[in-house]
Image: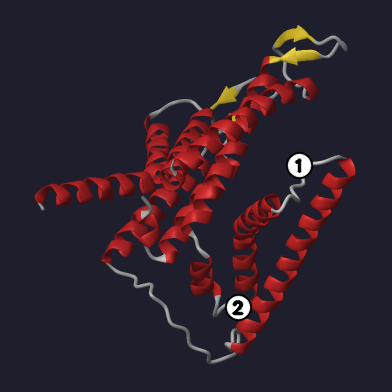
Amino acid sequence: MNEFKTYHPIVNLVYFLFTLGFSMVFMHPLCLFVSLASAFAYSVMLGGVKALKTNLLYMLPMILFTSLLNPLFNHEGVTVIAYLPDGNPLTLESAVFGIAASVMLVSVICRFSCFNAVMTDDKFIYLFGRVMPTLSLILSMTLRFVPRFLSKLKQAADTRRCVGNDPADGNTVKRAKNGLALLSAMVTWALENSVDTADSMRSRGYGLSGRTAFSIFVFDRRDALTLALTAALGIYTLAGALLGAFDSSYFPILSFAQWDAYTVSVILAYTLLCVMPIIIEIKEKIKWKSTGSKI
């Protein structure tokens, strides 16, 4: 389920620019909930059971850990719940702010995982290759490096385990020796891969003036409609935020923007923007099931 990935790169980029930017800025509790829920759901749609396990095993504990850690060091706020053994107050405002900050962090991480699944390196090169060829190549290589490195690391570790050189076996000296050997192999692979990539791109004339490139991306009516809707929702949400629809303050007291019809409309626009890929995926799945039932 990755129908949104088949859209034109400019549509994907504009969507993630809006959602990532808003996820990093909005601190209103309802915005945080919408951001986390939509990012969590979409990452599970893209990654399946593996993404669900990752979110449950790492993201949720991260929320709990950060939420509990913040009140221990941040003592701002006027509503004192209790006093810590060192005499510092435990305030309601610091506890709520810790929850909000942790939700923001996890939602941004989930959103970036979706970004990496949708915005592939060929899309980056297509969008920025002519304008910023060097920067676009470096950026695409950087985004691609981590998943490739982890995959290669697992492959190398499995290979060494089969020949009895697992870094987890033996005494301390043997484990350290095997671990250093594995690290050396991975560093060598990374350096050789970067050199091979640079030579390959240079031999293809990448970055030279007048160079043409083949592209499979076509901007059609579907992309135009989705881009227009994304831009409209994003601009409306941004305008609402600038006008104070999402104003929120955690210190010295909890204070949030008052509810009115305009605030509700802005929140609905932000919600629709965040869940747009989910709606696209569900619509495509229903379409495929309907098509299959007619065969």
Residue 12's place in the image compared with 276, above or below, is below
Residue drawn at x 42%, y 36% as measured from the top left: 267
Looking at the image, is 201 positioned above or below residue 46? below
**Which residue bears the numbered disc 2?**
133
Is residue 17 found left or right of 251 in the rendered image? Answer: left
Give whichever of 214, 147 is nearer the camera.
147
For the point 34% across and 70% down, the residue is: 219
Residue shown at the point (43%, 43%) measured from the top left:
48
Q: Position of residue 203 (x, y in %)?
A: 61, 89
Check disc 2 and report its element: helix, strand or loop: helix
- Location of residue 186 in the rendering, given as x and y in whole percent from the top left corner: 73, 61
Q: Which residue is mark 1?
A: 168
Q: Is residue 250 visible?
A: no
Mark 1 or mark 2, which has the lower sequence index? 2
Around disc 2, counting alpha carbons within 10 Å, would you say few (fewer than 14), some (14 to 19), or many (20 or more)?
some
Q: Residue furthest left?
A: 294
Q: Amino acid at mark 2?
A: Pro
Question: Could you tell me residue 197's position as x and y percent?
Answer: 64, 76
Tell me residue 3's x, y (percent).
34, 55
Residue type of the residue flagged with mark 1: Ala
Mark number displayed over residue 42 = none
